[in-house]
Structure formats: structure tokens, C-alpha cells
Image: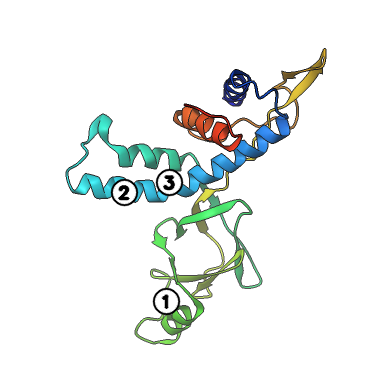
Amino acid sequence: MIDRVYQTVKMLANTEVRGNFKPSDFDKALYLVMLEKIQEYPFELNRALNRQNRGLIGNGLENMPDDIYEKMQHYSVEAPLTYASGLFSLPTDVRDIDTILYLDQHEIDLCKNAAQFNHINNFKHTAPTITHPIGLRIGSKIKVKPSTIQDNVKLHYLRQPLVPKWTYVIVNNTELFNPSAPDFQDIDMHPSEEDDIVNRICIKMGINLK
């Protein structure tokens, strides 16, 4: 996908007689666009769900919430967590936490802050148990109670997108696409986003799409 986007943006740039642009500039603009779109997904999903609840959009092919959810699921990952020194370590590519499960069946409820975590943990009527555990995120770690839980914890999360890179070789002073390069990275997004990615990159590069 990345070469199609690159060539389309290049064609539009040349149409405006703006000349060529550096592949590194394209990579930077592309990554910024990807981050923008990922940040918009939750707002788009909420908006679509509200419209669906009001009967403004239908189901089936018109089911916009499912379409947006599918785009978000492109980044869905399941991974076991490693325990050390009383804490579970999160993967380095975590963007948003979906669910944390113990023994694949007991959901670990994440507390909003340390005060809530300590209150639930210390109050005898709400003290966490194996079947109703709680957790607190501390930076890149998760603290879980009861403390007897030290393994069999699995995280479901949305990861960060991979940084794109349009790789090339120089032939007769011209950059030619080279997907065989070891640092090549295609666009890490749902294929349906291609057109909007082109539009947004053009805007960032000051290309008039009118």
C-alpha cells in the first residue's frame, strides 16, 4: 500500500508543479497522519454508536460502528504478562488496554488511581479475591491484588502502529521503490484507509486538492 500512496502523492505534487519531495519527509507526514487517524477512532466510534442508537444509520453494510471497530481491531494484540518484584510488566507497544484476564476467565478490574486501589484493597467488604482481582497501572507496570496472583495473567490491548518507511534505491538519480530493503515497513493500517491517508498527506504537504 505504501508505494501506491507514495506514487499518488507524488503525482498530485507534480500536478501542482511543486517538484519532488524527500522520501524521509513522506515517511514523517505518513506517520503523523496514521497517529491522527488512530486517535480519532474512539470519537468516531462513539459518534456512530450514538447515531445508530437514534436510528440514523442501519445495520449490515451500513453498520458504521462495526466498520470502525474493525479498523481498531487491526491493532488488537493478546499477550501474557511477565511477573517480577510484585509487578507485571506491560509490552512496550501498548497504546490502549482493553482487558486483563487471570486464568482466561477472571477480569482484573483496573482502578482509576492509587486512592481507589487502596480503598478497595483495604476495605474488608470489597477486598479483592482470586475471582474478583483488581489492578493499578504504574507507568509500564501493573500491580495486581490479591498478591497471590503471580502468573497466568493475559493482556488484551491495542498496540502502537509500526513506523512506516518507503525504502528505495537510487538509479540514474531517481528513487526507485525497493520493498526488499531490510528496513522496509508498509503502512500499518486497515486497507480501507488508503484514500483518506493520501488526502491527509497532501494537506500536510500543502498540496491543494481542489
Residue 22, position in %: x, y? 73, 30
- Which residue is situated farthest in the left direction here? 55
In the rendered structure, the answer to whether residue 185 lies left or right of residue 174 reads: left
What's the CA distance linking mark 3 and mark 2?
A: 10 Å
Task: Determine the residue positioned at 44% across, 79% down.
Answer: 116
Q: What secondary structure is marked by label 3?
A: helix
Up-down: is 122 above or below 59?
A: below
Task: Determine the residue positioned at 47% across, 82% down.
Answer: 115
First reached walking from the N terminus: tag 3 or tag 2: 3
Residue type for callout 1? Pro
Closer to the camera, 67 or 199? 199
Tell me if I can see residue 76 in this picture. Answer: no
In the rendered structure, the answer to whether residue 12 lies left or right of residue 102 reads: right
Q: What secondary structure is marked by label 2?
A: helix
Residue 2, position in %: x, y? 60, 26
The residue that label 1 is drawn on is 128
The residue that label 2 is drawn on is 47
Which of labels 2 and 1 is toward the front?
Answer: 2
What's the CA distance linking mark 1 and mark 3?
A: 33 Å
